[in-house]
Amino acid sequence: MVFNAGASSWVSEFVFEAVYDVMDVEEEYDNINLTVVEGLDTGGNPMNAATESVINLLVDTKNPTIVDAVPSVAVVTNAVEGPDGFSIEIQFDEPMGPFTMPVVTFPSDELNGALVQSISGFWQDASTYVATFDVNPIAIVVGNVDIQVTQTNDENENPLLANIAADVFSISLVASVDEWNLDGNLSVYPNPVASGNNITLQMSRVPSDLSVSLLDASGKLVKMLAIQNQGGNQIEISTSGLSAGNYFLQLNSGVDGAVLKFTVTK
């Protein structure tokens, strides 16, 4: 705080109103002592230097930050599909305003509506908020999802500024054949498959606008697959160069899509 002489004034013979400019320096102070000097009475007599402890004065320009974000599950799958199926416990470094509901979004916009924040979120304690989400049946695989928290303040109304938490969770929702409206009769075999052998993606008809992405278990793109058999009903896919583990085939055709899981063994 910096004393502002121009804005300060006497409001009566005995009361002086001191005005201070408050700087946003990301600090918090209490138990502040006030020293008054250079005062004169009406006869020109100087005052004795006086120091008085100011009671109930707190200067708080510190913005809250996110300490941790803990998901209810590390990977969102079909097992938690439905209303309030997923939650994130968000921990702040100081008590927050209890009458705000933080808004939690995903900066990358990759989730395409798979997770929608519900109104069931609650403050677990003064510095911990549990955000809840409806899990929708959308075929998607995304790894290392970041979250962004907005529209919340600390108890002294300082806004949250450092509001990104990185790599909070991953999501792997797999559509069943019935959930994919394109053709039905969708399958991948053999599954599991020995590394180096081909797998067959089979459906009633391979659409002309079909695209297929090969993803690893974290949702990272391994490669886009060239489709050679539009109009037929099978696509042969090589597993050459793939390490043992779980993989996903992400299929898209117009507004339709599906994700099929398969396993590569040694």
Image (tube, grey):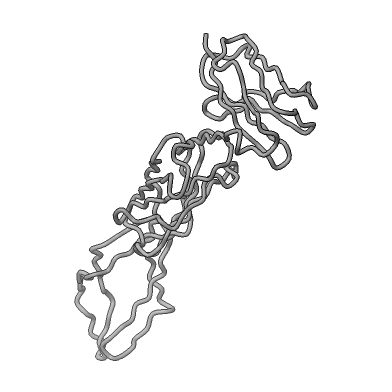
160 vs 107: above or below = below
Q: Residue at x 48, y 49 (%)?
A: 134
Q: Which residue is drawn at 64% across and 37% down?
A: 180
Question: Is the N terminus in the top left, top right, bottom left or bottom right quadrant?
Answer: bottom left
245 vs 10: above or below = above
- Say which of 168 and 243 sits in front: 243
39 vs 123: above or below = below
| Rendering coords of residue 112 (x, y %) | 60, 45
| Rendering coords of residue 188 (x, y %) | 62, 22
- Say which of 57 and 195 sits in front: 195
| Rendering coords of residue 115 (x, y %) | 52, 46
- Say which of 38 and 19 sits in front: 19
| Rendering coords of residue 206 (x, y %) | 75, 28
Question: Quadrant location of residue 15?
Answer: bottom left
Count of numbered tags: 0
Question: Quadrant location of residue 8?
Answer: bottom left
Residue 30 visible at all: yes
Q: Which residue is drawn at 43% across and 45% down?
A: 85
Residue 26 visible at all: no
Q: Which residue is drawn at 78% across and 24% down?
A: 232
12 vs 166: above or below = below
Left or right, 123 with reference to 184: left
